[in-house]
Image (spheres, helix red, strand yellow):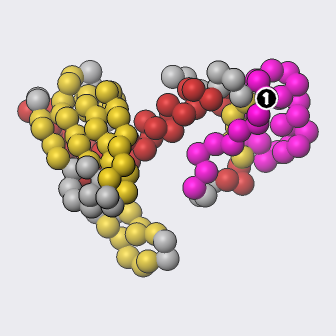
Amino acid sequence: MPRFEIRNFRSQRGHEGPGFYCILWVDGVRAAEAIDHGDGGPVWWTWFDAEARRKFDEYVAAQPEEPYGHGIGGTLKPDADWVIARLVAEHEVRRKIARGIKTKCLFRLKSDEGKDVAFRTLNMPYGPDAVAYLRKKFGDDLKEILNETFVP
């Protein structure tokens, strides 16, 4: 599977929701500029590398159908806009974690699986006291402490 990386990321507010600007890198190659104006329209793409585009298109085509969710039945076939939006969302979560572990203790619970919860925050620095508190409070429900497992 190709390795995708989001760089030069900037979020923006649009008329129909959040938008973004980013550069997509595929296997270490500057592949494309992607712009979502947040206006309800498609993502604007400017491709820089044909081989990287081929790899990205193959990855998109290999994606399984996803349920619509939010109480709506049926499935959808992810397209390039959906995949870049998911990559951007993952990038934003990783960025928040990298920033958060500097001053707080971040963790995940097993009971949060399937919920729209990326992580939880304990408003104290990571250390033996924070770990002891989390293990005592959540016990077996504690899935991971991101300060111990996160690799930027």
Q: Nearer the viewer, residue 79 or 54?
A: 79
SS at mark 1? Answer: loop
Residue 4 x %, y %: 32, 32
Instruction: Give the crowd class for mark 1: few <14, some 14-19, many >=20 residues within 10 Å.
Output: few
Residue 120 x %, y %: 69, 42
In the figure, residue 102 lies in which quadrant?
Answer: top right
- Quadrant where the N terminus is found in the figure: top left
Instruction: State the count of labels.
Output: 1
Q: Which residues are magenta?
A: 116-145
Q: Would you place residue 23 above or below residue 141 in this image?
A: above
In the picture of the structure, the residue carrying the numbered disc 1 is 124
In the figure, residue 11 lies in which quadrant?
Answer: top left
Asked whether residue 77 is drawn in magenta, I would say: no
Instruction: Give amino acid for label 1.
Output: Met
Residue 86 x %, y %: 38, 47
Please indicate, yes or no, whether residue 63 appears anywhere in the rendered image.
no
Asked whether residue 144 is drawn in magenta, I would say: yes
Residue 6 x %, y %: 33, 31
Please indicate, yes or no, whether residue 74 appears anywhere in the rendered image.
yes
Instruction: Name the residue rendered at 28%, 34% in the picture.
Output: 22
In the figure, residue 67 lies in which quadrant?
Answer: bottom left
Instruction: Name the residue rendered at 71%, 49% in the picture.
Output: 110
Q: Nearer the viewer, residue 105 or 76?
A: 105
Q: Nearer the viewer, residue 59 or 43?
A: 43
Instruction: Name the residue rendered at 35%, 35% in the picture.
Output: 10
**25 with respect to 115 (left or right):** left
